[in-house]
Amino acid sequence: MTMMNLFESENSQNFTSSPKTTKYDLPDADVTLIENFFTTQESSDLITNLINDIAWQQHAITIFGKKINQPRLTAFYGDQNKIYSYSRLVMNPMPWNEDLLFIKSRIESYINIKFTSVLLNYYRNGNDSMGWHADDEKELGINPVIGSVSFGQTRTFQLKHIKRKDIKKVDMSLSNGSLLLMKGTTQHFWQHQIPKTSKFLDARINLTFRVIQ
Ligand SMILES: O=C(O)CCC(=O)C(=O)O
Ligand SMILES: [Mn+2]
């Protein structure tokens, strides 16, 4: 190895920290965050590919009788026989592509589960958001397992217990290359959201891998 190569390889290692796992101690929930689950290089390649290759759409949804555009772009990919409905939208999956299969198999080798589908969200800036909800659609089964991957801009992800007013809202930062796992009874007792912010923020892509029964 020449001096130059040595310098470059040492330098590039510094950009990626090793994975860090945090298990949240929350009642009625099973939530684990693994930061740096993907390396900086993988994350940067993947966000570029996903922005360009995914068939992004902006759906209109009806809230209190009013039709509005969802404040983000979305897409749904997965096994061809698994249809998903949420917010009165029926999502027909696009077929898996190579990048999605790469991300899916990385999560599947970490937790022992096979996902059937992925819902993708593209938050173009701080104005894009996702309101309070639980991933509790009946096709996800009794205790849904959700593997949520984030690329790009760090955004605040908030969780609130829907029954216990004595428990404070939980804020977590979902950073580039992180994996958030939600399982057990989490979706029965907690809702989550990505709030809007007036801060100038860059693009973020989130992928929530799901098992449709
Ligand atoms: O963007 C996120 O981190 C959350 C996405 C989400 O909750 C969902 O797709 O159901
Ligand atoms: Mn969700």
Image (cartoon, rainbow, N blue to C red):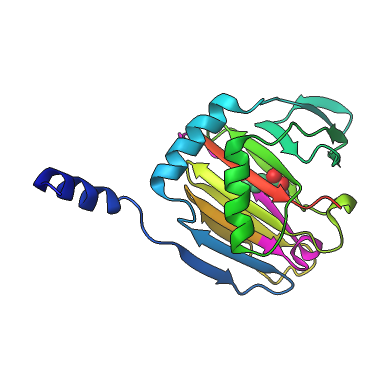
Q: How many marks?
A: 0
- Residue 132: x and y in percent read 73, 49
Give left or right: position of 43 versus 91: left
Query: Does the rendering let one see residue 129?
Result: yes
Question: What's drawn in magenta, residue-wise?
Answer: 182-202
136 lies left or right of 132: right
Magenta highlight on residue 24: no
Q: Is residue 196 visible?
A: no
Q: Nearer the viewer, residue 186 or 71?
A: 186
Magenta stretch: includes residue 192 = yes
Q: Is residue 79 left or right of residue 98?
A: right
**Residue ID at (64%, 37%):** 121
Q: Residue at x 78, y 59 (%)?
A: 144
- Where residue 42 sits in the image (x, y, percent)? 44, 44
Q: In the rendered view, tell whether residue 90 sits above or below residue 10.
A: above
Give coordinates of residue 32: x percent, y percent: 59, 65
Eyeballing the image, is 186 above or below 66? below
Q: Nearer the viewer, residue 47 or 96?
A: 96
Q: Residue at x 16, y 50 (%)?
A: 6
Farthest-out residue, front:
1
